Amino acid sequence: MTHAPTDRPVLVLNAGSSSLKYQLVVPESGELRAAGIVERIGESGSEVADHAAALEVMGAQLRDDGVHLDDVALRAVGHRVVHGGPDFSAPVVIDDAVLERIRQLSALAPLHNPAAVIGIEAARGRFDVPHVAVFDTAFFSSLPAEASTYAVPRDLAAKHSIRRYGFHGTSHQFVAQATADLLGRPLTDLRQVILHLGNGCSASAVRGGHAVDTSMGLTPLQGLVMGTRSGDVDPGLHAYLSREAGMSIDEIDTVLNKRSGVLGLSGVNDFRELVHRVEAGDDAARLAFDVVVHRLKHYVGAYLAILGGADVLVFTAGIGQHSAPVRAAVADGLGELGIAVDPARNGDGSTGARIISSDDSRVVVAVVPTDEELAIARQTAELVG
């Protein structure tokens, strides 16, 4: 059986330390042929010893779904890599040198890049096609110097590659274009504030399709309040906890990344459960919700100033797409800034891209689903030709 070039799928892999998420996507049409996850890789009692074994499990799962990887004329494999550091500002075909540099960047993303390296090594051994790394940080690599620079000694920053990198860039870039398509306007004409709200959350200011600011920084800890991450705190908190609580740097890092955010304030990190608790009168849940919204408004206001106004405010990712209460709360009181949400449109349970602002809102407010895997597949296909 012959395959037209535009029928050939890309395998998108997202390797975690103990999991492997995969999707088989046709980039041009957006057709999702298969998707799944292999979990408990390398854990005690698991039959999946390593990522090479996980690829075999993935192949078996795909065959159960009627998909045989050896028969689909696989075009390439696209790998999600969280941190590209100062080196990678665009997708890149993976060779040995690229792989080694991704490994060296693990100091900037110790929870993510090592797993990506292991996944890439296993996949290169299994699939004799081009492999492409698509970096979460790439979209933000062109931030203006005033937005990417921390006010720390220049020699220290240069030696240790300290700057604002930003994350979720694949999502923000995809949503920026999808929003332009929704509005029927050229991407180059738009000023956008994009809120990617999931278990991890980030905001971006995008002018003409180029990011000019974003909330995450050197690491994904900075910025908005998230499921288990604190977001912005006083940088002196680390020294204070070290002195007063006798905590080590690693302990403080664990608290801020895994035990803070909505979980730390309310005891739950599922936002749907948080809203249920708010509606039931739970004071801790109400405070957590209000803290989340306060921080969101803080960034929306800041990015309106950075952009000199906005044409569109966009909500995306799990919470952004599905939580009408969050969207309503963020827009509440922003009428003087030109932002107003129509309650009926906001409450509509539709899942597609849609406008939820009122007719008299100067700024369009939109809900636009993200699809990072499709974005990775398309960037991969574009690079390999």
Image (cartoon, rainbow, N blue to C red):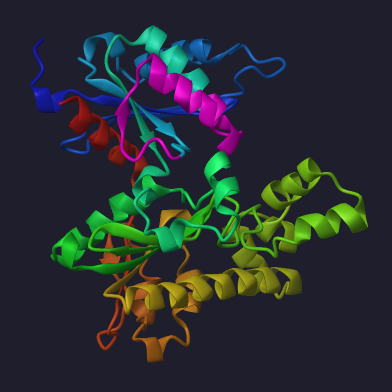
The residue lying at 62 percent from left, 54 percent from top is: 227
The residue lying at 41 percent from left, 33 percent from top is: 80
Residue 111 on the magenta segment: yes
Left or right placement of residue 237 versus residue 160 in this view: right
The answer to whether residue 321 of the structure is visible from this angle is no
* Nearer to me, 37 or 306: 306
Label count reads: 0
* Nearer to me, 122 or 383: 383
Residue that extends furthest to the bottom in the rendered view of this protein: 336
Q: Which quadrant holds the C terminus?
A: top left
Report which quarter residue 109 is drawn in: top right
Report which quarter residue 182 is drawn in: bottom left
* Nearer to me, 324 or 49: 49
The answer to whether residue 257 of the structure is visible from this angle is yes
Report which quarter residue 336 is drawn in: bottom left
The residue lying at 78 percent from left, 49 percent from top is: 252
Residue 148 on the magenta segment: no
Q: Which quadrant holds the N terminus?
A: top left
Left or right placement of residue 48 versus residue 263 in this view: left
Residue 231 placed where, x, y %?
62, 59
Residue 199 placed where, x, y %?
55, 51
* Nearer to me, 338 or 151: 151
The magenta stretch is 86-115
Residue 234 placed where, x, y %?
70, 65
